[in-house]
Amino acid sequence: MATRSVQVQRITYISRRPFAEVLARLESKIGHPDMSKFSKDVAAASTDEELEQVVHRAVGPADLMEFNRMDFGAVLKKELGPKAPQSVRLLVGNPLIMKQMVKRVPDAGSYAPVTILVDERPDGIHLSYDTMASYLAAYGNPDALKVARDLDSKIEALLAEAAG
């Protein structure tokens, strides 16, 4: 058995805009493909160029796409009622970016796609992200870290824009 410690850096932007507006601003910059069709198209791609075309059709202006979402706020409302805070976890990424990291550091597949948490707190709407570079730093691969830092920059810009 091998054990590796990973220290994670979390970035959080806080917005005073309404939750729905912040989430909509975020959603407008990422692609929302039909994941069943996307998976079939990825499987059908026979070359790297065809894969790139499939991904480019799926990503949004931020060069990212949504893989999945979990609406924790809807779950909280079952117990807390309409005053429950809103909270949504988005799994976002770009398979081409993930590929570049995973081929250098296979464990990167444990961290990608990444999580963006959008949640309502007393001081505003928090947009939080654990940086990919912090996950991969422990592996010591400079090429993977460069890709991770580029991804972190894309996501930080996305969060800053969504927070307004």
Image (spheres, grey):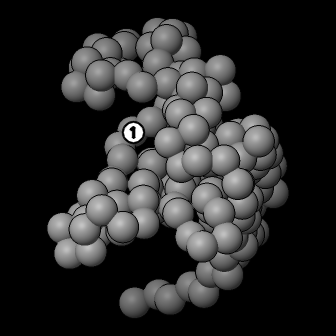
Q: Nearer the viewer, residue 111 or 16?
A: 16
Q: Residue at x 18, y 67 (%)?
A: 78
Tell me: residue 149, above or below residue 47: below
Q: Secondary structure at mark 1?
A: strand
* Residues packed near mark 1 inside 10 Å, few (<14), some (14 to 19) or many (20 plus): some
Tell me: residue 94, above or below residue 15: above
Q: Nearer the viewer, residue 84 or 112?
A: 84
- Which residue type does callout 1 highlight? Phe
Count of numbered circles in the view:
1
**Residue 128 rendering spot, x and y as whole percentages:** 62, 61
**Residue 30 rendering spot, x and y as whole percentages:** 55, 29
Q: Residue at x 62, y 80 (%)?
A: 6
* Left or right relative to 136: residue 164: right
- Please tell me in which quadrant of the rendered image residue 49 appears: top right
Q: Nearer the viewer, residue 38 or 109?
A: 38
Residue that carries the numbered disc 1 in the rendered image: 67
Q: Residue at x 53, y 63 (%)?
A: 120
**Residue 134 rendering spot, x and y as whole percentages:** 71, 68
Q: Residue at x 42, y 59 (%)?
A: 86
- Please tell me in which quadrant of the rendered image residue 108 appears: bottom right
Answer yes or no: is residue 147 visible. no
Q: Give the quadrant of the C terminus.
A: top right
User: Residue pushed farthest left?
Assistant: 78
Q: Give the quadrant of the N terminus.
A: bottom left
**Residue 107 rendering spot, x and y as whole percentages:** 51, 63
Tell me: residue 163, above or below residue 37: below
